């Protein structure tokens, strides 16, 4: 009887996992590309050492990929004469080149080592995890075996990624559409922003509007104004979202929100809503809890809408579909 009960529980839990996710394994490349892990780690370490903003850029790229049609590397595809790809949507214009570059470097090395085996979507998922860990963040498991998507369209992006001026209601709705709870939304947002950065244009209304945003610490607002003064002539001017420890993955971003040091309006809004402020306070107080919740949310995110089997392909180049037509 005990055996039958265990079998029933196992079968029930397995049947609740989407077929695409159940095909992913931790050792997917153990036989077909044994040096996959070491090659990814070597290039990630080199790139992050050269360009310390690579981790933040790659984490953002990964989220923007998974949020639209699942984790299938569709955000990496360039537009063609017949297709306007995801990268052309205005919210993706600020995705940093370092993230695309680290994926491209890894893909080139892996194509030399084991041609046609490793997907760009698996590369992006693994590189993101390794970069998070390298900056002091939590380690979490990355299941592998994703295929690269066959579709990338700019028209699919809108409504799937929160913007800098979104309200808490809008953010919750966006994350809920992907199957995430409010707690997971706060954990993922804080994780992305603790090492993240933003261009001054995304906070210009808060700083240079008719009425300054009262949610911002006044002295902090003045410092940001000075830093962003020339944002209209230099669109590349950016600010770190965590002004205390911008290069380290920790909970200082959450502590900053409590002090009125949230850069983006959407971040400051988390302190005004009873559904989110208690979570922010909890994570600001307990770094270990923040890390564990973020790690679980990232594991969940990393298998969102993955393609396996004939539903995708292993691209030869991450920015081009294999069949250009």
Image: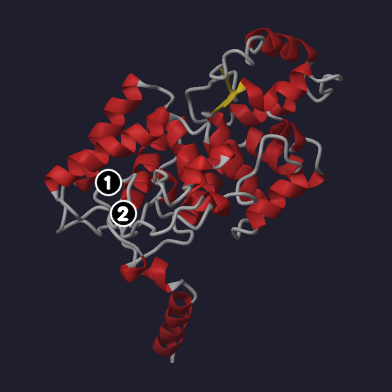
Residue 130 image-quadrant placement? top left
Q: Quadrant of the C terminus?
A: bottom left
Residue 157 position within the rendered picture, expressed as x and y whole percent measured from the top left: 57, 50
In the picture, the disc for residue 317 is 1
Relative to 179, is 6 on the left or the right?
A: left
Instruction: Reply above or below: 127 against 9.
Output: above
Q: Residue at x 53, y 53 (%)?
A: 68
CA neighbours of label 2 inside 10 A, class few (<14), some (14 to 19), many (20+) = few
Residue 204 position within the rendered picture, expressed as x and y whole percent measured from the top left: 71, 21
Instruction: Reply above or below: 96 against 61.
Output: above
CA neighbours of label 1 inside 10 A, class few (<14), some (14 to 19), many (20+) = some
In the picture, the disc for residue 135 is none
Relative to 86, is 183 on the left or the right?
A: right
Look at the image and tell me whether residue 143 can be seen. yes
Q: Residue at x 39, y 43 (%)?
A: 78
The one nearer the camera, 26 or 177, is: 177
Residue 248 position within the rendered picture, expressed as x and y whole percent measured from the top left: 48, 25
Q: Is mark 2 on a helix, strand or loop?
A: loop
The residue under label 2 is 324
Q: As drawn, which residue projects farthest toward the front?
A: 81
**Cα distance in 3D space between marks 2 and 1:** 11 Å
Q: Residue at x 70, y 43 (%)?
A: 279
Q: As drawn, which residue projects farthest toward the bottom?
A: 1
Residue 189 image-quadrant placement? top right
Residue 153 position within the rendered picture, expressed as x and y whole percent measured from the top left: 49, 52
Look at the image and tell me whether residue 136 can be seen. no
Badges 2 and 1: C-beta atoms under 8 Å apart?
A: no
Q: Is mark 1 on a helix, strand or loop?
A: loop
The one nearer the camera, 102 or 30, is: 102
Q: As drawn, which residue projects farthest toward the right?
A: 211
């Amino acid at each position: 009887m005990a055996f039958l009960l265990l079998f029933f529980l196992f079968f029930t839990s397995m049947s609740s996992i989407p077929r695409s996710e159940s095909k992913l394994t931790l050792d997917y490349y153990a036989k077909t590309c044994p040096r996959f892990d070491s090659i990814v780690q070597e290039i990630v370490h080199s790139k992050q050492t050269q360009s310390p903003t690579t981790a933040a850029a790659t984490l953002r790229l990964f989220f923007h990929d998974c949020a639209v049609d699942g984790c299938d590397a569709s955000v990496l595809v360039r537009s063609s004469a017949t297709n306007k790809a995801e990268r052309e949507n205005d919210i993706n214009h600020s995705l940093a080149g370092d993230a695309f570059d680290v994926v491209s470097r890894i893909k080139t090395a892996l194509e030399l080592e084991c041609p046609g085996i490793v997907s760009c979507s698996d590369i992006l998922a693994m590189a993101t995890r390794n970069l998070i860990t390298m900056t002091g963040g939590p380690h979490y498991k990355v299941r592998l075996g994703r295929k690269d998507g066959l579709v990338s369209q700019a028209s699919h992006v809108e409504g799937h990624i929160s913007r800098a001026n979104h309200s808490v209601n809008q953010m919750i709705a966006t994350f809920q559409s992907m199957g995430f709870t409010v707690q997971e939304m706060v954990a993922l947002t804080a994780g992305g922003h603790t090492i993240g950065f933003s261009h001054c244009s995304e906070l210009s209304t808060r700083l240079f509007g008719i009425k300054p945003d009262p949610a911002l610490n006044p002295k902090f607002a003045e410092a940001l104004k000075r830093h962003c003064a020339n944002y209209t002539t230099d669109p590349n001017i950016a600010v770190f979202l965590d002004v205390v420890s911008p290069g380290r993955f920790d909970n200082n971003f959450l502590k900053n929100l409590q002090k009125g040091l949230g850069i983006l309006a959407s971040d400051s809004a988390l302190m005004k809503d009873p559904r989110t402020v208690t979570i922010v306070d909890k994570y600001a107080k307990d770094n270990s809890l923040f890390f564990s919740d973020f790690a679980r949310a990232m594991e969940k995110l990393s298998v969102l809408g993955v393609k396996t089997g004939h539903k995708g392909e292993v691209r030869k180049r991450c920015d081009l579909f294999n069949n250009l037509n």
